[in-house]
Image: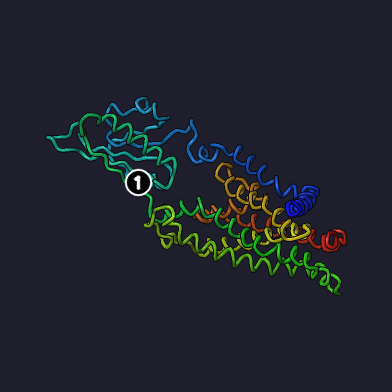
Amino acid sequence: MKKFSTIWTIAKKEFSRFFKDKRMLMSLFLPGVLIYVIYSFLGGTLMDAMLPSEDYTYRVCVVNAPAWLTEEALSPYGDFDIESVSAPVEDGEQKVKDGALDAYLVFPNDFVIGGLGGELQEVKLYANSAETTSSMAAEYLTAALSSVQYGAPNFLLVPQDVATEADLSAMMVSMIGPMLVLVMLMTGCIAVAPESIAGEKERGSFATMLVTPVKRSYIAAGKVLSLSVIALLSGICSCTGVILALPKLIGQENISFDALGYGVGELASLLGIVLSSVLVMVALVSMLSAWAKNVKEATGMISPVMILVMLSAFATFFLPMNEWYFFCIPLLNSAAALGGVFSMATQPLFVIITVLVNLVTAGLLMWALTKMFDSEKIMFGK
């Protein structure tokens, strides 16, 4: 009995230490609360945001349209705006690729259901699989045409995808890339920052550094600089491994990232966004590490930040990130700007705003970190 009594006494001591510490309680329950709020908020919003709205009107150009193919006939599938022409449009495919049309449907001359002389006639359906609205339009048109064919093969529908390999690769990378980059960068920060600050506080070596005749602002800057480089290297290694394995992960080994064709502008934008984002993350994690008493507490306090980073990456799916003020929100702006770069739709103004806002935010966080280093209560409190 004495053995169990001793075990229970030690357990009670740990329970008392944990449950009486508000900061450790927060690190225990806050991640679960944030996950509940995020999942409840997202719900079906993410999928709904990726699909066209219910009142969206699909723009379709039809060459030699048969009498039965009308907007009313397609109404069960959605709202369609059909432009009927009697001859092929010279730039019809390009309009689909540019987004001016959602689909381009070409019937042969003298089209007759059942074919001419028993020979099936080809009906070509041009769509862009890299665009959601175009893919949905093609799906609905295919369903409508299939209903006409029910019972007998009356004609041959030939899908024509105008999306190039680069378009498909860019779409895939733009969907997954921002979250991967931000999460991996944050993971690198979490791996090094708590040990560098909270760990040294716990061991007592940080106190020795603070009493040296060195400005504490220099100590803060040195910490953030070194941790940023280490976190960046860790993030780059992790992102490279995940991106190289991505085609196999999603079962699309034919997707080639070499086909994306990123130019100097995209690479420079990517570098600026990543570097400025790392500074923000490291400064934020360093503040939490300085506030914590030990590495364990620091890790618990940082966990909600990782959830916020993931939320920022997901938020770009359902927020209209086409206004400049969205890019004034740290981390959210990084996810949106990365998405623009990966999809090869970079807007220089948004990238510049993102980098400047991140640098200013990192500077303010470093200033706050310096003030924390100046506080004897924070740095030497038990």
Residue at the bottom extreme of this rendering: 213
Q: Horizontally, is 261 left or right of 373 in the view?
A: left
Disc 1, SS: helix
Q: Horizontally, is 198 left or right of 72 in the view?
A: right
Front in this rendered view, residue 237 or 203? 203
Q: Is residue 266 visible?
A: yes
The C terminus lies in quadrant: bottom right
> What is the x, y in percent for residue 29?
70, 45
> What is the x, y in percent for residue 2?
76, 53
Residue at the front extreme of this rendering: 1
Q: Horizontally, is 85 left or right of 251 in the view?
A: left
Residue at label 1? 93
Q: Residue at x 22, y 29 (%)?
A: 151
Q: Residue at x 61, y 59 (%)?
A: 187
As shown in the figure, which amino acid type bears the numbered disc 1?
A: Glu
The colour scheme used here is rainbow
> What is the x, y in percent for residue 194?
71, 62
Q: Is residue 23 visible?
A: no
Vertical arrangement, residue 358 with respect to residue 58, above or below? below
Q: Residue at x 57, y 46 (%)?
A: 314
Vertical arrangement, residue 229 with respect to residue 304, above or below? below
> What is the x, y in percent for residue 60?
37, 36
Vertical arrangement, residue 242 with respect to residue 20, above or below? below
